[in-house]
Amino acid sequence: MSLSDYLKRHQKSHLIFDFDETLIKLIIPWQVEFSVGSIKDDLLALDKSIYESFAKNKISFSELQNEYISRFGAKIKDLIIKNNIHFESTYLKDILANPDLIEFVKRDTEHVMLIWSSNTKPTVERALKKFNLEGKFSKIITREDVTLIKPYLEGFEKLYDPSVPKNMYLFVGDSKFDRLAAKEADIDFYYVDYFEVPGKYW
């Protein structure tokens, strides 16, 4: 069922979009994000066991970030975000569109549209500019705006308007963390499978 068809059956006023693998797809080698540069040494020095769990694919890179920041606080948070920004700006090769969702966002005038992304602000802004989506989103939460990323709810809390009932919100996303975040926020979830491939890295 398309998002347009879903919204004909379910009244919503606020649409929260995940970014990568939902609206667009970043062509970037995520699997090496925490293996290049000095960040690996920094993480190993703090707690070898967390990094080894990541290296053995027992936890995702989202969980890697959240575990280190939960344990070691602001100092490692700043290093991780700095690494995120450098990695995305250096290794991003291309940005692909989910054409149906892009067109939906461009033509829709009935909903308040928001972004909740674990990508960095420069990357999100670059993609919005590429697909002429600037100005379409009322608020955008990116990696720099939160301490812990999805499924933690800090991003949602920065988007949420308490005057709007939660049943009027819909989270549009592609990953298990998006789905879990929607569940934890007590809002509905719409699953996007346009870019779905076997063996997702998260």
Image (cartoon, rainbow, N blue to C red):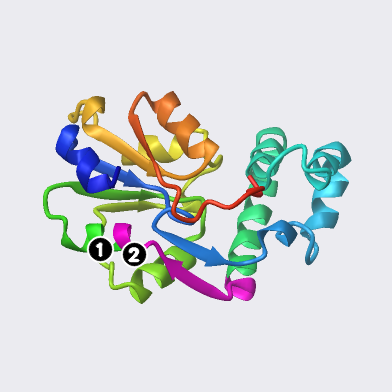
Q: Quadrant of the C terminus?
A: top right
Classify mark 2: residues with Cα within 10 Å, few (<14), some (14-19) or many (20+).
few
Numbered range of the magenta stretch: 89-101
Q: Residue at x 39, y 37 (%)?
A: 156
Question: Would you place residue 74 above or below residue 169 in this image?
Answer: below
As rendered, which of 123 and 19 lies closer to the eye?
A: 19
User: Which of the 4 quarters of the picture holds residue 194?
Assistant: bottom left
Q: For residue 45: magenta?
A: no
Asked whether, in this view, residue 157 is left or right of residue 143, the answer is: left
Is residue 142 in view from this perspective?
A: yes
Q: Amino acid at mark 1?
A: Glu
Residue 61 location (% of width, % of height): 68, 47
Q: Amino acid at mark 2?
A: Pro
Q: Residue at x 81, y 56 (%)?
A: 40
Which label is found at residue 103? 1
Question: Would you place residue 108 above or below residue 54 in this image?
Answer: below
- Label 1 SS: helix
Residue 86 location (% of width, % of height): 63, 68
Q: Residue at x 49, y 30 (%)?
A: 180
Q: Quadrant of the N terminus?
A: top left
Residue matched to label 2 = 99
